[in-house]
Image (spheres, coloured by chain):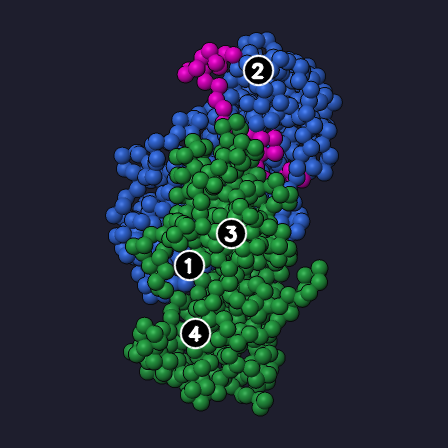
Chain colours: A green, B blue
Amino acid sequence: MAEMVGNLLVAQSGGPTAVINASVAGVVQEAARHRCIGKIYGGLNGILGILNEQLIDLGAERPETIEDLKFTPAAALGTCRYKIDFKKKPEKAARDMDRLFQVFQAHEIRYFFYAGGNDSQDTADKLHGEAIKRGYEMRVIGVPKTIDNDLPHTDHCPGFGSVAKYNACTVMEVAADVSSMATDDGSCCIIEVMGRSAGWIAASAVLAQRTPKDPPHIILLPEIPFNEAAFLAKVKATVAEHRYCIVVVGEGLKNADGTEYSADKSRLDAFGHPVLSGAAERLAELVYGKLNTKTRSVKLGYAQRCAAHYASATDSVEAGACGRAAVRAAVEGKSGFMVKLVRNAGAEYRWTTGLQPLSDIANVEHLVPRDWISADGFMPNEKFVRYARPLIEGEVKVPTLDGLPKFAVLERKTIAQKLPPRK
Amino acid sequence: MAEMVGNLLVAQSGGPTAVINASVAGVVQEAARHRCIGKIYGGLNGILGILNEQLIDLGAERPETIEDLKFTPAAALGTCRYKIDFKKKPEKAARDMDRLFQVFQAHEIRYFFYAGGNDSQDTADKLHGEAIKRGYEMRVIGVPKTIDNDLPHTDHCPGFGSVAKYNACTVMEVAADVSSMATDDGSCCIIEVMGRSAGWIAASAVLAQRTPKDPPHIILLPEIPFNEAAFLAKVKATVAEHRYCIVVVGEGLKNADGTEYSADKSRLDAFGHPVLSGAAERLAELVYGKLNTKTRSVKLGYAQRCAAHYASATDSVEAGACGRAAVRAAVEGKSGFMVKLVRNAGAEYRWTTGLQPLSDIANVEHLVPRDWISADGFMPNEKFVRYARPLIEGEVKVPTLDGLPKFAVLERKTIAQKLPPRK
């Protein structure tokens, strides 16, 4: 494959994670090692910023700042939820594509890296296809990112290990609190975590158990239809045995008919998903109302996906490696792939990176397998634990200032615009 | 004062904190230095366990376990919400007192330490008074503990610094997440924190600001009556300026008429307080409904008061010192006091411990002073920041096992009961 000389553009998309910036650091640090790569640009707010020709010079950032991205949460470049939808809005999508390639061409972008989840990999796939169609030489590689861990073909997704670690720690701490307050009346605490379709995040709360008797006592996954009677019976039995009960619920818990347990159908997000809120609150009302057991709820919300202060070192390292692998693959001539994490065989946890065609990724959701969940559906089993345990190993060291984290802040030296403003 | 020879009993009461066990460690470690103190007992579940003669031998625990209590959250001895109420239930209260002194006498308890908040200090005060009335020689010292920071006479309360640190870190991280997602439509995130009457916890979220422009943008305190119109105007202006708005709300936010913004009056806790839930959820509905701005909520709940993984080292050290000071005071002959933290004059943060009569403490609530809050009521000012900033300094080191905290677990060697069971 002939060497391709040109500039690099990296952007971030979708919901942030604790380690999505580590992937950007990996891209920037690896790119600096390859002479074929000229300028290293970042696109602000994903595709949306690129449409608006909002580029910054990542090569001009201090190397220390780039290094510090490895412990800095959220999207340092900004992110977006913006879909190029050829099916529903073909004319707008075509205009967007024209504009994006005008921007790429104006800035001689020959390497494009997009860090994101399912929807973002779909965008990357479309860009790859358009580049070929238009005869514009550009190598497009997707970098996996999602706390939801629902991308197919990769063993797991950067971002998941950190949310799993933070949530499991939180469940362990909350359980210590609730159990120490538990007197004869009994009590219940319901902790709501993210996960719209896939229950990976909820399931990972099982890691808080050091023995099978330990909390959490019940984990409700979106994959398992909610059975109110069985749930209430399990809460009652748990309170009778332990005097308290810790429940973890994925926000996207489903009823038997497939509707969401707590969907507010009057509110939709940019992708047309119903906005979910209050699964824990609804369950708390149920438990209190039916069992007369004192019940409290916790809704971690955004706090869980940006908890860099308790991120997994394994996750951060892997996220960085995915960024580096993306650049290496592109330099070697690959395009139209997503970097994936591959788990090696053997008892000890070892991994490498690999590549998967983007067309295999887009819009496919990887759910928790049924045989990784107990027969009663209330707890992931040892197969899940074996899978997830290594992903939360190690703590990321975050420097502090005045007792709080000191995260990286990019200088964001803007690149002069060469095109007329987008209409 | 004559040396008093006898056994020691320590117990914990009320809601746990990240550092209440550090106070127990301080008591146990200091007690071991005084020959007049014989056995070192712990009472399980506060007064409730003592009524049931459930004592354990803290002197038999491994010294390493006691040391590890300094980073172990929740109440290692268990706690309770149990009130000896002479006004409402005089006969039951009298029976309880008889029983407690039977237990004290049976186990030759001459030193009693009770770690807790307002209600617990009230219990300690009553025990002190009863001991004098009954001519039973026992020295009673209260150890301050409450995340709410609402005890009077002490500069601040052990437990507060840790919740302030964790919450401020969480607000900083959530703000990074939300701001990185902020595109033109704007968004709002509302974070609910604890604090029923006093706004110390909510106010401490201001520590997440490194400049006055930083998030959080609005802090709603229980001390300031909620003004819906002013609040919505401020959210709107903030979203217009920054494209996002971070709001922190204390769970006990009040309406102008003094009623709680989100009280569910159908549910009462053991002290007759209405159970509060959903201030953030209600505000989110308000913002979305009136401003059509995408809004998400976070409810930290119990997660904030047991977050040992991000506890304040300053707080942990002070909590331990309060336990040690309590023992020293009792050995010196004092009784009927609560240990307090005294801030020394001067620019640099320095503190000592002092003593305050328990009768000055019980049932008095210390609120955030009005002149520590901005004129518009939406933000604590520099007086508050100067007060709170030193309290979150330093990180407690927590050892890990399999990627999660490894907290202390007491062996809980039980003391043989000497009395017939409580009726």
Q: Are marks 1 and 3 on the same chain?
A: no
Q: Which residue is mark 2?
A: B422
Mark 1 or 3, which is nearer the eye?
Answer: 3
Q: Label 4 neighbourhood size at 10 Å, few (<14), some (14-19), many (20+)?
A: many
Can residue A77 be seen from the camera position used here? no
Sequence-earlier tag: 1 or 2? 1
Q: Are marks 1 and 2 on the same chain?
A: yes
Q: Which residue is mark 4?
A: A123
- Whether residue B270 appears in magenta in the rendering, the answer is no
Q: Secondary structure at mark 3?
A: helix
- Mark identifier at residue B178: 1
Q: Secondary structure at mark 4?
A: helix
Q: Amino acid at mark 4?
A: Thr
Sequence-earlier tag: 4 or 3? 4
Q: Which residue is mark 3?
A: A202
Circles 1 and 4, Cβ within 8 Å, touching? The answer is no
Q: Which residue does the image show at 48% across and 51% down from the upper left?
A: A224
Rounded to the nearest angstrom, the CA distance separating label 1 from label 4 is 22 Å
Front residue (pair A133, A397): A133
Rounded to the nearest angstrom, the CA distance separating label 1 from label 2 is 55 Å
- Whether residue B94 appears in magenta in the rendering, the answer is yes
Is A299 rendered above or below residue B343?
below
Q: Which residues are magenta?
A: B68-95
Q: Amino acid at mark 1?
A: Val
- Mark identifier at residue A24: none
Q: Are marks 4 and 3 on the same chain?
A: yes
Of all chains, the one bearing label 2 is B
Rounded to the nearest angstrom, the CA distance separating label 2 from label 3 is 43 Å
Q: Which residue does the image show at 52% across and 41% down from the upper left?
A: A246
